[in-house]
Amino acid sequence: MDSPILEPSLYTVKAVLILDNDGDRLYAKYYDDTYPTVKEQKAFEKNIFNKTHRTDSEIALLEGLTVVYKSNIDLFFYVIGSSHENELMLMAVLNCLFDSLSQMLRKNVERRALLENMEGLFLAVDEIVDGGVILESDPQQVVHRVALRGDDVPLTEQTVTQTGYHHPSSGHD
């Protein structure tokens, strides 16, 4: 039996962003050319930050896009999809990213810890979204795969125990 061909528009993410509490970019990955230049991306980022950093809600419609977001200490996390995208799917991506980072950073999800673990962040986002398509929404799976791929990504003891994965000590010269 042939597997059904997925519509390319199914559950797609246009961008994943992390801004600091001044609205400056710490991480940004755009999956299409809605904002083709860095200048346009930064203008969009300033716009969403200005519209969202003082509100308690989790969803905004902006510039014809659906934006789901979450803030923690001095970080703002955004997942952006088209206006007809399912907010629950975008929310699942946002929560998966946040929960994965929370485990990898030992619940210390703030700017300094994130900047010290950018490699882990890049790997985690790649496990969750690939080319805009949502691959994974289970943080345990993401953390496990990141651990397998990255040598220097810190793992908490709890994570190691839960995944049953033991990281061999890396030989640093």
Image (cartoon, grey):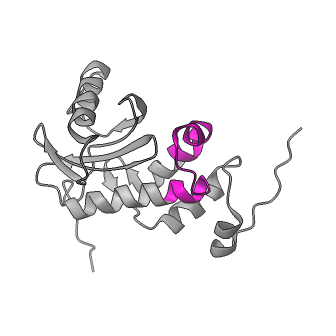
Q: Magenta region: which residues?
A: 100-122
Which part of the image, by quadrant, shows the C terminus? top right
Identified at 23% across, 36% down, the residue is: 48
Residue 113 is a magenta residue: yes
Which x, y percent locates residue 132? 31, 48
Front residue of 14/3: it is 14
Q: Is residue 108 above or below residue 46?
A: below
Question: Where, by quadrant of the figure, is residue 62 drawn?
Answer: top left
Identified at 38% across, 29% down, the residue is: 22
Front residue of 73/105: it is 73
Which x, y percent locates residue 137? 40, 65
Question: Where, by quadrant of the figure, is residue 98 drawn?
Answer: bottom left
Front residue of 52/125: it is 52
Visible residue check, residue 6? no
Which part of the image, by quadrant, shows the N terminus? bottom left
Residue 30 is a magenta residue: no
Please indicate whether residue 30 sits to the left or right of residue 161 in the image: left
Q: Residue furthest top?
A: 39
Q: Is residue 4 above or below residue 38?
A: below
Name the magenta segment's main secondary structure.
helix
Q: Residue furthest bottom?
A: 1
Identified at 38% across, 52% down, the residue is: 129
Q: Is residue 149 above or below residue 39?
A: below
Visible residue check, residue 144? yes
Please indicate whether residue 166 sits to the left or right of residue 80 in the image: right
Identified at 55% across, 41% down, the residue is: 114
Which x, y percent locates residue 111? 52, 38
Which x, y percent locates residue 26? 45, 33
- What is the number of callouts on the image? 0
